[in-house]
Image (cartoon, helix red, strand yellow):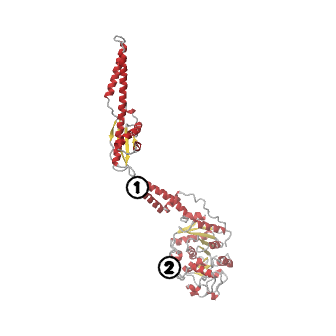
């Protein structure tokens, strides 16, 4: 029945390192909580740093520079004067004024000098731990600078006066050597030179030094210049955001869960057929109880895709990663086919189909056992839907060899066979069922299934040659086993007390076959109310150990459509 299906190349992780802008924004949106947390921590850290950082106050004194040697104002270099403000000579005088305990060099480090372009103004800024200390320091340096300029100017005038006086004395000695009445021309020249030097000397002796003035005295600032709260908090917010982005990307890379349809398509190498929320936490399959719901309509879309993709394909395998617990997806798909008028069989190991027995009201076992699988299927309350157990997972291979891998006898009376590879415990069961299927549909649950498991499943299906038709992505759901153990409008058909079905199966397999146990399941029939109503199957010619478990009979009058 499988035909010559093309080999499906296993999905590759190539290209996953390339992240688009949209994917990056999606990562940040998924990790929004972490981002907000890191931003909050960044702001808190900046706040703590702000509280523990010493406050610094700055005050500025404005000095208007004047030429001291009678030259034009344009000859004053503000760059040179800025260097003079922070020189050791000026700092030493300011140190004495401020009674600074440190060295002049240390005091000069607290001074910053700036000058507007095309001006003769110096802005002397002093930084200190207190507001008044900053104002006093700026004024002290401004006054010390002006005093220094005054001192330098006075020294220059004194030097000039001394030179002129020396020149006058030399000329007077030369004039005294001339005889009266002789060399009158030379005498006149010497007298003129002496007169000019005397005039210069009078100018220097009467000059007043004006080095400049404090145009604006420094005042105590009302607030510290640093640290600046907005700058600190904005920096903490930015650093927290950057750290949060790095951690978000690292955390998202380590998170292997499937979240979007595009991720599932990338893993499968096949399209996602449906993406739907699921109500599997409810008491019944949505395809039966809520036929007009979005979930039921999604399964109808899936059923259409399965039947339209390859008209000759009538055996479809629904498989998952085994990480999502029990699933209602096979029951929903099988019920959808049946409700569309197709004779449908839901088949799988006993552990997989047991939930369907409890939920669909499967009838008791037939009075006699045949040698064909079709004689061992059970009718359900859904017209056209039967359930067929293929026995225990451990002996699944032997069971299928006994009854034939092709399931031809079942297909003679059914339009579609849905193989339940979702609710199996052993990974080998999905692979073994895949050998019977014409095509497979991989079901994943958002934020539960993992990329690694889906890629592994794709490789396993490729090894047995079953093509993957596509994927199904379902939303977050409740556990199916928890639903079967709850009371309510639809109580479970099996006893709620005692160990779960899978636990009982493991215990029975470990103890070995016992008289009165259902073949292939290891569960005592007298513990199941369904078997109490049907009677002891072993007395009616029931199956031998290792045969498929009978879960009911096919509804009368149903036949496979040609």
Residue 172 versus residue 142 in the image, above or below: above
C-beta proximity under 8 Å, tags 2 and 1: no
Among the 4 quarters of the image, the one containing residue 524: bottom right
In the image: residue 235, left or right of residue 197: right
Tell me the number on the disc at residue 10: none
Q: Nearer the viewer, residue 440 or 144?
A: 144
Q: Secondary structure at mark 2?
A: loop
Quote the CA–CA distance across marks 2 and 1: 59 Å
Any part of residue 354 in sight? yes
Q: Nearer the viewer, residue 254 or 52?
A: 52
> Could you say where residue 238 lies in the image, as x and y percent from the top left?
45, 55
The residue under label 1 is: 52
The residue under label 2 is: 486
* Front label number (2 vs 1): 1
> Could you say where residue 212 lies in the image, as x and y percent from the top left?
34, 36
Q: Residue furthest top?
A: 181
Q: Which numbered disc flags the more N-terminal residue, 2 or 1?
A: 1
């Amino acid at each position: 029945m499988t035909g010559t299906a093309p080999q499906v190349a296993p999905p590759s992780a190539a290209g996953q390192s390339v992240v688009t802008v949209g994917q990056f924004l999606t990562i940040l949106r998924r990790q929004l909580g972490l981002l907000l947390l890191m931003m909050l921590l960044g702001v808190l850290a900046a706040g703590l740093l702000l509280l523990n950082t010493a406050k610094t106050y700055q005050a500025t004194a404005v000095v208007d520079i004047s030429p001291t040697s009678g030259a034009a104002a344009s000859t004053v270099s503000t760059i040179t004067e800025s260097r003079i403000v922070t020189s050791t000579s000026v700092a030493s005088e300011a140190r004495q004024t401020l009674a600074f305990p440190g060295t002049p060099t240390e005091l000069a480090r607290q001074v910053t000098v700036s000058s507007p372009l095309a001006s003769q103004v110096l802005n002397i800024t002093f930084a200190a731990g207190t507001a008044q200390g900053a104002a006093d320091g700026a004024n002290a340096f401004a006054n010390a600078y002006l005093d220094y300029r005054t001192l330098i100017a006075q020294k220059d005038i004194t030097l000039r006066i001394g030179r002129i006086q020396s020149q006058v004395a030399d000329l007077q000695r030369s004039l005294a050597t001339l005889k009266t009445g002789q060399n009158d021309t030379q005498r006149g020249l010497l007298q003129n030179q002496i007169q000019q030097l005397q005039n210069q000397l009078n100018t220097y002796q009467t000059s007043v030094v004006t080095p400049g003035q404090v145009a604006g005295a420094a005042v105590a600032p009302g607030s510290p210049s640093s640290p600046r709260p907005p700058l600190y908090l904005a920096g903490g917010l930015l650093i927290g955001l950057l750290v949060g982005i790095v951690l978000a990307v690292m955390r998202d890379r380590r998170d292997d869960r499937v979240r979007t349809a595009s991720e599932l398509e990338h893993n499968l190498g096949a399209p996602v057929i449906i993406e739907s929320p699921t109500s599997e936490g409810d008491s019944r399959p949505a395809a039966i109880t809520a036929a007009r719901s979005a979930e039921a309509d999604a399964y109808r879309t899936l059923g259409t895709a399965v039947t339209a993709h390859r008209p000759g394909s009538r055996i479809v395998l629904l498989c998952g990663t085994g990480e999502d617990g029990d699933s209602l997806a096979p029951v929903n798909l099988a019920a959808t086919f049946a409700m569309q008028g197709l004779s449908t069989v839901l088949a799988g190991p006993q552990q997989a189909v047991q939930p369907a027995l409890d939920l669909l009201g499967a009838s008791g076992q037939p009075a006699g056992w045949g040698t064909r699988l079709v004689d061992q299927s059970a009718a359900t309350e859904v017209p056209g839907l039967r359930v067929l157990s293929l026995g225990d997972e451990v002996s699944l291979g032997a069971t299928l060899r006994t009854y034939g891998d092709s399931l031809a006898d079942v297909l003679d009376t059914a339009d579609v066979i849905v193989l339940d590879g979702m609710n199996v415990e052993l990974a080998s069961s999905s692979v073994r069922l895949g050998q019977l299927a014409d095509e497979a549909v991989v079901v994943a649950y958002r934020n539960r299934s993992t990329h690694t498991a889906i890629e592994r499943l794709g490789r396993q299906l490729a090894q047995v040659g079953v093509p993957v038709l596509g994927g199904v992505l379902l939303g977050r759901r409740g556990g199916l086993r928890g639903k079967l153990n709850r009371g309510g409008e639809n109580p479970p058909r099996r006893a709620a007390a005692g160990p779960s079905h899978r636990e009982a199966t493991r215990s029975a397999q470990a103890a070995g076959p016992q008289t009165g146990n259902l073949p292939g399941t290891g569960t005592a029939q007298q513990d199941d109310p369904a078997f109490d109503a049907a009677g002891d199957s072993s007395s009616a010619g029931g199956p031998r150990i290792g045969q498929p478990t009978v879960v009911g009979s096919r509804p009368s009058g149903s036949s496979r459509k040609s």
